[in-house]
Image: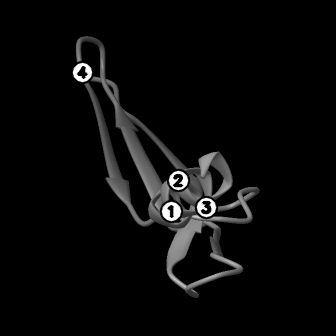
Amino acid sequence: MKMRIHRDQLMFKWITKDHEIIVGFKHVRHGKCSVCGKSIPWGNTICDECFEKDKKISRK
């Protein structure tokens, strides 16, 4: 059985004829909400909860 191993930083891939196994850690970037400071996905500036509160206030 032939097997190949690839390494990409902390991610390891073992590839055989019929299977592929991926093990490791992947760095995920997070930002902070500008209102409450909660951790949110990168690229967003405000979390969903703060957005809903702001939306309710703006309707009144």
50 with respect to 43 (left or right): left
Question: Which residue is label 3 attached to?
Answer: 54
What's under tag 4, amino acid-wise? His
Residue 28 coordinates in the image, percent (x, y): 57, 64
The reply to whether the C-beta atoms of the residues labelled 1 and 2 are less than 8 Å apart is yes
| Residue that sits furthest to the bottom in the current view | 37
Kindly identify the residue that appears in the image at 50 percent across and 62 percent down: 53
Of mark 1 and mark 4, the one earlier in the sequence is 4
The reply to whether the C-beta atoms of the residues labelled 1 and 4 are less than 8 Å apart is no
Instruction: Give the CA distance from mark 1 to mark 3.
Output: 4 Å
Front: mark 1 or 4: 1
Question: Which residue is label 2 attached to?
Answer: 56
43 with respect to 6 (left or right): right
What's under tag 3, amino acid-wise? Asp
Q: Secondary structure at mark 1?
A: helix
Residue 23 coordinates in the image, percent (x, y): 32, 54
The reply to whether the C-beta atoms of the residues labelled 2 and 4 are less than 8 Å apart is no
